Amino acid sequence: MNDADRTVHRLVAAIAPDPGPGLTPLARELFEEITAEPIPARARWSLATLWPRRWFAVPVVAVLAVGTVVLGWVFPAVLGVGPTPASALDIRPAGNFYIVTVRDIFADPDVYRSELASRGLDITLILLPAAPEDVDAVIVANDDPRRKGKFSFSDGGIGTVEKPGFCGRWAGCPIGLKIPVGYPYKTRILLGREARRGERIQMVQSDVRPLEVAGEPFYCLDYYNKPVSEIRNMLLVQGVTIEPEFVYTFKEKAMDIRPSAPDDWYVHNGAITRGGRPYLFVGATPYAIPPGRRIIDGCPAG
């Protein structure tokens, strides 16, 4: 098993069912490894970005703490009347939480910090230039001493707000952060933003890419919900000779990685490591894909 495969195994272990809204020991190990390494120029991915958000009964911040999650930071028109134009953030109370969206993606981090501090939040928000496929990715790390415990989102973690309805993106379409009023822990949040001309890509990611993105074996190929036996053949046709591993799902939860899966099970999604090993997300029943969904932007219709 190479380093990329070990990373994948730790990622799946770290976001297994009900890990709690902070970093598990495995997630902490992975996060420290990622943040300790120089940021590479190559676009990198996390398995956390590849599952449909609606698959998970896992508290959302468990995923946020270990990897990148696509986050559609739309302007507050979705949520109601916005703040004054001078505000870099839209921060509005919603019960016992604040709903936070970003209005000015190029504001100085001190401006974000000041606006959050005015609500009693010790949160550093930093927007980093990202590759096009990683714009709106997010990483959350905090000093919550309960992060090693197992408690639900309702117990006070930072989470996200999902856009209503189908969004057409496998990782879901959150529209903002959901932060408890009076959240007492020091927190650092990194968001991927569109890179300006000449900027170096800085968003931290992992060595995993979706099978269907440009340059990977299933680019513009329809492989969702096909049986495992057919996908094996498709991989061989595309020149992938390394045996795939299988991420089992059950009752909308990611379970564990296994070396094999029944030939008649269905492939819901897939990823490939830099070393060329495929990971197939599989289940005993097909995944319900709304009609007309485009696999990826830029591919021919149909």
Image: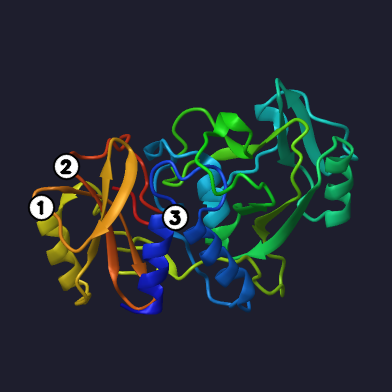
Mark 1, secondary structure of its residue: loop
First in residue order: circle 1 vs circle 3? 3
Location of residue 189 in the rendering, given as x and y in whole percent from the top left corner: 69, 53
Q: CA distance from mark 1 to mark 2?
A: 8 Å
In the rendered image, which residue does mark 3 sit on?
14
Task: Work out whether residue 58 or residue 76 is closer to the camera in this orientation and state it.
Answer: 58
Q: Quadrant of residue 61?
A: top right
Mark 3, secondary structure of its residue: helix
Q: What coloring was used for the rendering?
A: rainbow
Residue 215 in view, yes or no: no
Amino acid type of disc 1? Pro
Determine which of the numbered discs, if any, sits on residue 198 in the image: none
Q: CA distance from mark 1 to mark 3?
A: 25 Å
Q: Seen from this angle, which residue lies furthest top?
A: 95
Q: Nearer the viewer, mark 1 or mark 3?
A: 3
In the rendered image, which residue does mark 1 sit on?
262
In the rendered image, which residue does mark 2 sit on?
284
Q: Nearer the viewer, mark 3 or mark 2?
A: 3
* As drawn, 251 above or below 105: above
Amino acid type of disc 3? Ala
Image point 48% across, 42% down: which residue? Answer: 172
- Quarter of the image where the N terminus is located: bottom left
Q: CA distance from mark 3 to mark 2?
A: 23 Å
Task: Work out whether residue 221 or residue 211 is closer to the camera in this orientation and state it.
Answer: 211
Amino acid type of disc 2? Ala
Location of residue 249 in the rendering, given as x and y in whole percent from the top left corner: 27, 45
Q: Residues within 10 Å of mark 3 (few under 14, many from 20)?
A: many
Tell whether label 2 touches label 1 (CB within 8 Å): yes
First in residue order: circle 1 vs circle 2? 1
